Image (spheres, rainbow, N blue to C red):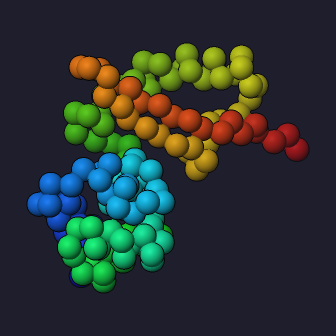
Amino acid sequence: MDRAAALQKIRQAREAQGLSYDDLGKAIGTKDTMYIAAALHGQHRLNAEEAKKLAQALGIDAETAMATTSMPLRTDFPLTTDPFKYRLMELVGVYGDALRERSNELWGDGILSAIDCKVTLEKKGERGVITIDAKFLHYKEF
């Protein structure tokens, strides 16, 4: 079974079991909820022990769960027609220049790391709160 098919099987098992990503986070015990959700979409990876715990929680074979241990190939963005992802890109379009200018004021010339970050999504009534807790990296001068 190829990786994409295995990941789809894993996501389907999660839905069939009625388990939330919070439930999987508790079952695995070492990764945060958003990280696990991204791993089940091939954007992060679990280690072998975590994959075994995932298999046990979902009632799937360990071989299928091992698909989550493969190195991510992050090529499936940014173009999308999915409304949720499109609106996130719209937010960047509307606020991107302002965020860039504000970050320059706060830290100088650099970027917020997509490698060294934690992303959370919270429900607050009818509102969604997305937090990106990222390390700021200064551009090197040479």
In the rendered image, is residue 73 in sight?
A: no
Q: Residue at x 26, y 34 (%)?
A: 84
Quarter residue 8 falls in: bottom left
Q: Is the residue 83 above or below the residue 29 in the image?
A: above
Count every numbered label the image shows and give the total: 0
Q: Residue at x 30, y 37 (%)?
A: 85
Where does the image place residue 75, in percent across and percent down from the top left?
A: 41, 56
Q: Residue at x 31, y 28 (%)?
A: 123
Where does the image place residue 57, in percent across and percent down from the top left?
A: 27, 67
Q: Is 60 left, or right, of 95 in this rendering?
A: left
Q: Residue at x 21, y 76 (%)?
A: 60
Camera-side residue of 25 and 92: 25
Where does the image place residue 128, in percent across and percent down from the top left?
A: 32, 25
In the rendered image, is residue 21 in sight?
A: yes
Camera-side residue of 85 and 63: 63
Q: Is the residue 99 above or below the residue 72 in the image?
A: above
Considering every residue shown, the one lying at the far left of the view is 16
Camera-side residue of 24 and 141: 24
Q: Is the residue 62 above or below the residue 86 in the image?
A: below
